Image (cartoon, helix red, strand yellow):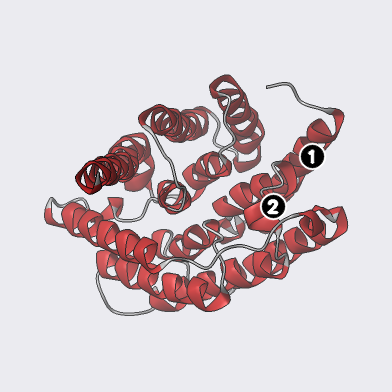
Amino acid sequence: MHLSTTERRNYLIGFVFIIFMVASATILNDMEIILPEIGALTAGTWIYQNGGWINQPVKIFLAPSGTAIIGFLINQLSITYAEKVLLGLLLMLVLLRLLHSNLAPSFATGLLPIIINATHWSFIFAILIFTALLMTGVFLQGNYKQTNPSELIQNQHMVIFTIMAIIWVTGVWFFGFSQMAAIPPVMVVFFEVLQKPEYGFKMAIKHFTALVGAATIGVLVHLVVASWMLSAIISLPLVFVLLQLLRIKLPAAFAFPLLALVLPTEMFHMLPITAIIASTFFLGSIVLLNKIVATYKVSSSETDE
């Protein structure tokens, strides 16, 4: 993809903002300040100018902050990890519906405190501060004025998302891999493509490659470089190059290198494998579902004739 001067500037500002977040965590020696989905949100709002994300700037603050608080409070409950993930996803869906928001990264900010077992209020303060800064940046850029309002989350999409989440969480729990229950970047992409009228095999393969590639980059770089800052400085541009080669814009991919920095050890080493399995399950299910719907429409039209 050819980048214009404005796009290059936006990428630079976005990367600096993400590195600033990681630097703050390094200086304060507080891992809970590293928020992977801030990487995705920054890419989607400041870099890619995703119309569906920026059309209501206030919700860039409200939705992720609200889901983060939900996840943080659920994490305090004395229930299993899989139950926390499932309960969190359901409550997040309800919140997004109440806010009339389709901001998919909100799922990731809500799952993060459960994944990393966040217990300090610094996590909440960090999410409030960084989402407020992102919202302010969108207001200053002013491009949100040229976008159309987001459509309300359709009931059928909520039902499909809930059913697939239940199947996934139940499945990984049954096979003894409950740590795989939450894989935020994949679920974010799943929620996004679920609402697209068309989603085919070729695009699913590109998304699969981007997600798995970004997860692998994040793990390999952090295995070689222990420093949070150096890992982010090296891995984020590599993810950018990967997306350029694939010729796609996928904000969620930028969350993986940051997610690799904060995952517990057992989840960290499994991240690429988890990304492969989760991406295959969620993205494959959408492709299959769309084929079934398309076949049904064709057969119905032939019957009417």
The amino acid sitting under disc 2 is: Met
The residue beneath circle 2 is: 21
Q: Which mark is residue 10?
A: 1
Q: Residue at x 63, y 66 (%)?
A: 127
Vertical arrangement, residue 122 with respect to residue 183, above or below: below
Category of crowding for the residue at label 2, using alpha-carbon neighbours closer than 10 angstroms: few (below 14), some (14–19), many (at least 20): many
Label 2 – label 1 distance at C-alpha: 17 Å
Residue 273 location in percent, x, y? 30, 35
Q: Residue at x 54, y 36 (%)?
A: 226
Residue 79 location in percent, x, y? 26, 75
Going by the image, does 73 lie left or right of 270? Answer: right
Vertical arrangement, residue 129 with respect to residue 265, above or below: below
Vertical arrangement, residue 169 with respect to residue 301, above or below: below
Going by the image, does 297 lie left or right of 38? Answer: left
Vertical arrangement, residue 180 with respect to residue 133, above or below: above
Q: Are marks 2 and 1 in contact (CB under 8 Å)?
A: no
Residue found farthest to the front? 305
Q: Secondary structure at mark 1?
A: helix
Decide which of tag 2 and tag 1 comes sooner along the chain. 1
Q: Which mark is residue 280?
A: none
Residue 90 location in percent, x, y? 36, 71
Category of crowding for the residue at label 1, using alpha-carbon neighbours closer than 10 angstroms: few (below 14), some (14–19), many (at least 20): some
